[in-house]
Image (cartoon, rainbow, N blue to C red):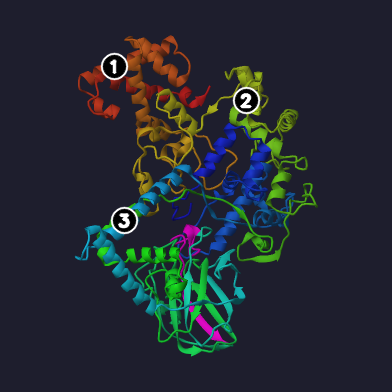
Amino acid sequence: GYEKDRPRSIWPYRDWVIRAINADMPYDQFTVEQLAGDMLPHATQDQRVATGFHRNTMLNEEGGIDPLEFRFYAMVDRVATTGLVWMGLTTGCAQCHSHKYDPISHTDYYRLMALLNNADEPDLILEDAATLTRQQELASSIAKLESQLPSKFPPDGGDGSEVEQRLRHFQEQFTKWLEAERQAAVKWTVLPVTQLETNLPRLEVLDDGSIFSTGDITKRDVFTLQFDLSQMPEPVTALRLEVLPDDRLPAQGPGRCYYEGRQGDFFLSELNAQVNGAKVPFASGSHSYGKISIGNGSADAANVFDGEGSTGWSTSGQEGRANHLVLNFEQAIPAEGELQIEMIFERHFAASLGRFRISATTAKPLVAAKPYPAEIESLLAKSPDSVTEEEMQQLQRQYLYIAPELAEDRKPIENLKKQIPEPVTSLVMQERPADNPRPTSRHHRGEYLSTREDVSAGVPKLFDPLPESEPANRLTFARWLVSDRNPLVGRVTVNRSWRTFFGDGLVRTNGDYGTQSKPPPHPELLDWLAVEFMENGWSIKRLHRLIVTSRTYQQSSELTPELLKRDPANELLARGPRYWIDAELDSDGMLSAAGLLSHKMLGASVYPPQPESVTALAYGNSAWPISQGEERYRRSLYTFSKRTAPFAAFAVFDAPSGENCLARRDRSNTPLQALTLLNDEMYLEMARSLAQRVVQNAADDIEVQATAIFRRLVTRPPSLEELSALVEFYQTQKHRLEQGELSADKITGQENSNAELAAWTMVARAVMNLDEAVIKP
C-alpha cells in the first residue's frame, strides 16, 4: 500500500472466508479463528490461514525504512480495525493521548495493542494438491534423466558395447575426480556454542550445530557468538560460515530479508574474531557464491573483514540454497579458551541471517571455499572405508552435475527444474514462544520513537476484564469478544447486516457505538436481534433470512409526500430500503444479466479489463495482464486489488482502496459513473453480450427483444411509455448505422458487427445507465 505496493499472496485467506460464509460457520468461531486461529489446540492449516485477517495491513517495502517503525503503524491499524469490526469503537482516538469524554484511556489503547502485538508474521507454505502433484511429476522426470546421465558419458573407444564404454569411461573419470578432491578436501569441525548475544533477534542452537534466528530484526543487527576451542586437536587456521536454507524463513532463507530487497536475502557487512579478548585478523577469504541484490557492488568474501560497513557478502539470487564462506586467519590461533565471533548485518534495509553454522579447521596451508555444498566436502574428507553406498551415490550425483562432458545432457534437467512451481503461500500470524514475548510500550503522543513505560496486555477498563485464569493473549481476547462479558459484538454484527440490506444501520454511526454516537431510534429491536443472533448459534445466514423475510424489509420503497414529511431519513422504517448498490455487486449483477458471470469458486485473483494507464502510473509501471476466458468474468470478489492503483471501474463507484478498514462506504452520484457504464471495456462487453443473447434467443419482435433487455437489467417489465422509448431508440440507432453515420464495429468493440447487434448494444448501454439498474429499488 506504500510506494512499492508489490503483489503479495493472501488469496488463500479470501478463499477461507468464502468457504466459512458458505458453510455458515458460527460467527463466534469465525471471530476466534481470524484473530487467533494459530493458537488453537492442534491448529489446522485452515485455522492458521484464517489469521491472515490482520495481515491485510499495509506493508512498507521502500528503501531505507525502519521495519520496526512500520510494524508499529501496522499495529495501530490492527487496533483500530479490531475496535471497529467487533466493538464498534473508534479506539484510534486514544493513540496519542486520553480525552476528557472518551472512556478508553491512552494507556488502555496500548494495553489493547499488547494483546495483538505478541505475534510474528510469517508466510505459510500451503499444501496445495495441484502444486504438489506437479512438483512430484517434475521430480520424477528429473530423477529419470539424472539416472541416465552415466550412460550419456562419451565412450572411451575401448572394448565392449557403446553403453559399456560410456559407463566405464564415467567410472574412470569419477574415480579420478574423487581421488583428486579427497586429497584437497578439508576436514571441518562444527564449533560448540557457549554463548549467544544479539541487539534484538533471538538466536537458538539447533541439533545439527546450526544457529537459527527468530524475533524482530533491524537495519543493523549484531550477533555476538562464543565458541569453545578446546575440542580442536591443533591450532585453528580457518573458519567456515555456512548459510543454510530453512522452510521457516522468507523464501526458505538463508536470510531474513522480508520488507525490502529480495525475500530470503541477507547482507553480512563485517565478521570480526577475538580469542580470549584479543582481536585476530583474517588474511584471506573465499566463497562458494556471492552476489549483491542491489547495484553492481562486489560480493567478495574479503569484504567482511575490510572494516567498511557499506561492503559485505550476500548470496542474492540463490535463496533457498546453501552456500558458504571461508576465512583464513593470518596466524593460527591456539586450540584453547574462547573464540568470539561478531557478525554485523548493516544495510539500508533489515537483512540479517536466519540460519547459519560456523566450523573450524586445522588444515594447512590456506584453504578455499569449494564450488559445491559443504556436505559434499564433508563426505570427501571422510575415510573411504567409512563412506556408505548412499553417500557414494551422493558423490556420484555431484560429479555428474559438474562433469564438463555432460554439459549438454544436463540442460534438459535444468529446464525441468525451472518449471517446478513455487508453493502457494499465505500471510499469517504466529504467536511468539512464551519465553520470548514482545514487550509493548506506551508511546507518548502516539509517536513511534517516544516510548515510555511498558504496559500489560488487557481490555479497556470500561469492559469486564479478561478471565484471570487465562493468559492475556490473542486467543483469550478473541474468546472474550464473543462471550457474555462483551455486550458489543452481537449488536455491532447485526447492525452491520442491517445496513447491508437497508442501506443504513439501526445505529447510523456504524463505526461508533460510544457515548458520542447517535443513539438508535429502535434500541429494543437492536437488542432483540443481537440476542436472537447469539442464542441461535451465531448464524449469519439465519440472521439474514430473518431480516429479508420481515415485513419491514419487504415493504415498498416508494416515497410519498406524507412519509417524506413524517420520516424523511426513514429512521422509523416507514418504507422499504432504496440505495446505491455497491460497485462490485453492480458489476456482478450486470455480468449475470449478460450471461457472462462465471460461477467458478476460489483460487488466485483475476484481472478484468481496465485502461492500461491505471497501473502505469503506479510504482514500477506494473502490468495488468488482462485475464482471458472464464477468468475474465469471475465475480468481483476475485479481482486483484492494488492499493496505489485501485480497479478503476470500482473506484468510480466509491469502492474504497483498502488502505484502511472502513465502517461504511461513501455513496456519490457523478458524471464519471455514467461515462464508465457507457464506455468502459468491461461494461461494453456486458452490453454486447446481452445484445447477442437477445438477437439469438428472443423472438424476432422488437418489443419482445427490448423487454428482454430491460427485464434482465432492471428486474421488472418496462411500462408502455418506457417500451415505446426503447423501441424508438433502437430504430433510430439502427437507421443511423445502416446509413453509415455510426460504426457498428466501434460501438460493439468487435469486428464485422452488423447494424442490428450494434443497435441492441446501444439499447443495453442505455438501460445500464438507468437509475434502477444501479440503485436498489
The residue drawn where x is 44% and y is 25% is 592
Q: Is residue 73 visible?
A: yes
**Residue 163 colored magenta?**
no
Q: Is residue 310 visible?
A: no
* Sequence-wise first label, 1 or 2: 2
Quadrant of the image occupied by residue 455: bottom right
Q: State yes or no: discs 2 and 3 in contact (Cβ < 8 Å).
A: no
**Residue 252 colored magenta?**
yes
Amino acid type at circle 2 is Pro
Reading the image, the residue beneath label 3 is 148
* Sequence-wise first label, 2 or 3: 3
Quadrant of the image occupied by residue 383: bottom left
- Residue 178 in the image: state x and y as whole percent: 36, 72
Asked if residue 715 is positioned above or below residue 267 in the image, the reply reads above
Front disc: 2 or 3 = 3
Front disc: 1 or 3 = 3
Front disc: 1 or 2 = 1
Amino acid type at circle 1 is Thr
Question: Which numbered marker is on residue 745?
Answer: none
Amino acid type at circle 3 is Gln
Q: Residues within 10 Å of mark 1 (few under 14, many from 20)?
A: few
- Residue 255 in the image: state x and y as whole percent: 48, 65
Reading the image, the residue beneath label 1 is 732
Reading the image, the residue beneath label 2 is 568
Spatial CA distance of label 2 from label 3 is: 82 Å
Asked if residue 176 is positioned above or below residue 476 in the image, the reply reads below
Spatial CA distance of label 1 from label 2 is: 41 Å
Spatial CA distance of label 1 from label 3 is: 74 Å
Q: State yes or no: discs 1 and 2 in contact (Cβ < 8 Å).
A: no
Q: Bounds of the magenta span?
A: 250-275
